[in-house]
Amino acid sequence: MSKTQAQNRCGFAALIGAPNAGKSTLLNGLIGTKVAIVTHKVQTTRARLRGICIEKDAQIVFVDTPGIFSPRRKLDEAMVDAALSSAGESDVIVVVIDANRGIEPDVELMFSHLKNQSVPCILALNKIDLLPREKLLELVELCNKRHSFDWTFMISALTGDGLADLKAKIAELMPTGPWLYPEDQIADVSLRQMASEITREKLFLRLHDELPYASTVETARWKKLRDGSVRIEQVIYVERKSQRMIVLGEKGRTIKKIGETARLEIEENLGIKAHLFLFVKVRDKWAQDPERYFEMGLNFPGKK
């Protein structure tokens, strides 16, 4: 590392918020490159993803969490638990609120969870380009009545407005200590997991609302070949045969297109030459299978 440990600071900043508040887009903007998948589908982020960046003498480990909402099923419960656990274990909490949607029920629920937190808490009012300034100031006042935030930042994760000031403040709040990761590392996730996430993003983007919520992607095989390229075999799990047909598409055209776009991004983002093979399997009630939760980095509800 380029600096002595005595000069360094390092800590964790949890990004929490309601579903689709823009946390993953914000994470990518703060890191300066894409480390989290982004789609319009609610609850794209399922497990905690760590993005890492250097700001002056501080290494900030951002934790992108699933959205906080009222859980209706085991997978929901596991994701909300992961988000709240990340907040409790962090040095700073960044609460991301969609300015255009305001204080909706999921935001109220999040405020209730914040009452038990004792670490510094930052309000990041996102998507400020969608509202006039007077409306934004009213919303800031309302949010600070619900919870006494230590700092408030108005940002646009999409355009980058306000991100530099937000990152500088978070860096100031990092505790003194040695950096936990090499200076050039930008994410704490295996290549296998990153490849799975890329394919899941392309799956959601391609199928939109046709694809049921209960689907996931796992990298079953990762084999380095003699020419330096990698053979990647991934399994897309769905719950019913009809869902499998949606993913495959007529004469396999849909899955072929998903595979092509995923492979290109895997090669670009991971810096490898890849041969990607996708398989679709029906696994009834996979969302009740503890092993699937383990693969996603989540605790199965009732098991810690």
Image (cartoon, grey):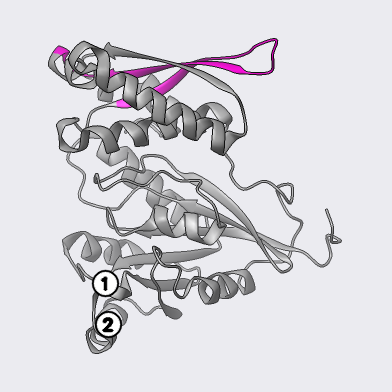
Q: Residue at x 46, y 64 (%)?
A: 93
| Mark 2 residue type | Leu
**First to last magenta residue range:** 216-241
State whether residue 271 is above or below residue 119: above
Q: On the image, numbered disc 2 is attached to which residue?
A: 136
Tell me if label 1 and label 2 are in contact, CB under 8 Å: yes
Q: Secondary structure under badge 2?
A: helix
Taking depth in this image into account, of 205 and 47 the one nearest to the observer is 205
Q: Mark 1 or mark 2: which comes first in sequence?
A: 1
Q: Position of residue 141 (x, y in %)?
A: 28, 85
Find residue 61 and report its image quarter.
bottom right
Q: Residue at x 53, y 77 (%)?
A: 165
Q: Which residue is drawn at 27% across and 82% down?
A: 136
Residue 289 appears in the picture as rendered = no
Quick check: 209 left or right of 192? left
Q: On the image, numbered disc 1 is attached to which residue?
A: 99
Is residue 228 found inside the magenta-colored segment of the image?
yes
Look at the image and tell me in which quarter the C terminus lies: top left
Q: Which residue is drawn at 55% across and 50% down?
A: 51
